[in-house]
Each structure stands twice: as C-alpha cells, then as structure tokens.
Image: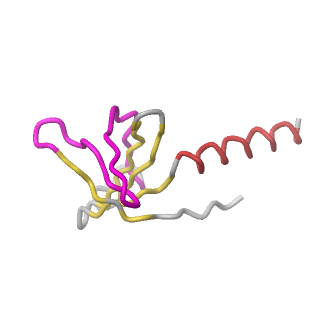
C-alpha cells in the first residue's frame, strides 16, 4: 500500500538555547511541549530530511526539515495520525 505524503509549509520558532520552541500553521501558533522522536530520511544521509515527531498540548505533529535549505514542512497532523491508526486496526481485524 503506497502512502502519499502531504507537506504543508510552516513557520518555525527556534530558541538558541533549547532548539525547537513552536511553530505556526494555518494562522495558529503551537508551542512544542516535547520532541518525542527525531530521525533522518533517508537514514544516515546528511543531505536528506530530518523528521521530528513533536507534542503540542494534547496533539502530536510530524514536522520535516530539509537540511539543504533549512525549509520546514508539516508532514502529518493529528487527525491524519488517528485516521492511519484506525485504518491499520481495521485492516488487522479484517485479516485476522
């Protein structure tokens, strides 16, 4: 099953001391409470993307940073994550 990624540009707020602080998406500000995971795509390549799974309030977002020009994009929103989880559970129930 192929999954099409949807990227939306975001404005990132970065602090010198603590790094990623927040972001602005569709006119709303989100304060990052925690960075849950960071990884590179493709793995080990310095010119790829750095992916961040962050928690802002009760929501989780997946942000991508293109390292070549420091451009940021929103990869997944909370409703997309919940939808993909629900579909995975549904397909597991059908196949079981």
The structure residue drawn at horizontal position 42% and vertical position 42%, both measured from the top left corner, is: 53
Magenta-colored segment: predominant secondary structure: strand
| Residue 21 drawn in magenta | yes
Would you say 39 lies left or right of 77 here? left
| Residue 32 drawn in magenta | yes
Would you say 55 lies left or right of 11 here? right
Q: Quadrant of residue 46?
A: bottom left
Instruction: Where is residue 51? Give x, y as percent.
Output: 39, 49
Q: Quadrant of residue 91?
A: top right
Residue 68 to residue 39: above or below: below
**Magenta span covers which residues?**
15-41
The structure residue drawn at horizontal position 35% and vertical position 50%, both measured from the top left corner, is: 44
Residue 73 to residue 81: above or below: below
Quarter in which the N terminus is drawn: bottom right
Instruction: Choose between 35 and 28: the one closer to the eye.
Output: 28
The structure residue drawn at horizontal position 45% and vertical position 45%, both measured from the top left corner, is: 61
Instruction: Where is residue 95? Give x, y as percent.
Output: 88, 41
Instruction: Choose between 1 and 79: the one closer to the eye.
Output: 79
Instruction: Where is residue 4? Give x, y as percent.
Output: 60, 64
């Amino acid at each position: 099953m192929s999954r099409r990624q949807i990227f939306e540009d975001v404005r990132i707020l970065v602090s010198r001391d603590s790094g990623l602080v927040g972001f602005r998406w569709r006119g709303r500000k989100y304060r990052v409470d925690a960075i849950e995971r960071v990884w590179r795509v493709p793995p080990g390549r310095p010119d790829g993307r750095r992916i961040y799974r962050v928690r802002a309030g009760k929501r989780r977002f997946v942000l991508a940073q293109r390292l070549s020009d420091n451009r940021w994009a929103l990869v997944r929103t909370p409703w997309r994550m919940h939808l993909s989880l629900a579909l995975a559970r549904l397909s597991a129930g059908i196949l079981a």
